Amino acid sequence: MNIKHIRNATLVVEYAGKKFLVDPMLADKGTIPPFPNSPRQDQNNPLISLPTSIESIIENIDAVIVTHLHYDHWDDAAKNALPKDIKLFAQNEDDAAEIGKDGFTNIEVLTEDTVFEGIQLVKTKGEHGRGEILKLAGLVCGVVFKHSSEKTLYVAGDTVWYDAVQEVIDTHKPEVIVVNAGDNQFFQGGSLVMGKDDVYEVCQAAPNAKVVAVHMEAVNHWGLSREDLKSFLNEKGLTENVLVPNDGDAYSF
Ligand SMILES: [Zn+2]
């Protein structure tokens, strides 16, 4: 497999000969208002430009996976750029209906036994925060990719560390795990995605996996920088376990 980190949670995953686009936020730098009630209100989103052209990102994509509809995962630029008949996976009927309102015609709801072109796509649970904030943050999912010719890949999505993430790791034994680790937060309510302690837990649960930390420094409410994560990993002796890509970096596994 090849995983290219585009920006924020946006990935291009080449897996068993198919090309997936995950959580496309393709807006130009600074074209969307900041998330409210959170740091950096003086900066519009995304905070940074795409590392490459939209055309090259969406070229030859076989399917798009949208883990949830927050605009840092599915935005107007993506809706405008993608062909309306492209194969699209959504986490549930509600999201599928919303995506359909924008004219997309080939939407499938992910389940625990979805198969696409011979590739198993397993919808996984996620919690987009802890406690009260969950009501505001709404439902999210992750996905496990499986194929006999490939290592197992777990894209965890916008989730904090909690028992269901441990369960996915125990059940599917992923060799590669992508985590959203920017510790994004509003002024109240705590972490909405993983921070460094969550990444540590993932490494403890999957000591032989390669963890790829993304969703960092791209939207205004980020709380953990790449540099801070890297120095934490250094302290904990986990630099071999966790990759912290810059936008545009790609890895083969
Ligand atoms: Zn997000």
Image (cartoon, grey):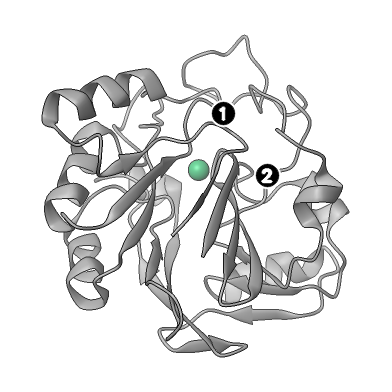
Amino acid residing under circle 1:
Ala
Residue 152 in sight here: yes
Judging depth in this view, the residue of 205 and 43 nearest the camera is 205
* 131 relative to 96 in the view: left or right: left
**Place of residue 244 in the rendered image (x, y in percent of width and height, measured from the top left):** 40, 35
The residue lying at 82 percent from left, 78 percent from top is: 105
Task: Please tell me which residue lies in front, 86 or 189.
Answer: 86
Precedes in sequence: disc 2 or disc 1 = 2
Residue 218, labelled with which disc?
A: 1
How many residues crowd around disc 1 within 10 Å: few (fewer than 14), some, or many (20 or more)? Answer: many
Q: Residue 196: x, y in percent?
A: 24, 32
Q: Tell me if I can see residue 225 in this picture.
A: no
Task: Give the residue drawn at x 25%, y 20%.
Answer: 231
The amino acid marked with disc number 2 is: Met
Whether residues under marks 2 and 1 lie with C-beta atoms below 8 angstroms apart, the answer is yes
Q: Quadrant of residue 127?
A: bottom left
Q: Is residue 136 left or right of residue 246?
A: left
Is residue 7 positioned above or below 178 on the image?
above
- According to the picture, the residue beneath numbered tag 2 turns out to be 25
Identify the residue at horizontal 48%, vertical 36% (top origin). Answer: 245
Number of marks in the rendered image: 2
- What secondary structure is marked by label 1? loop
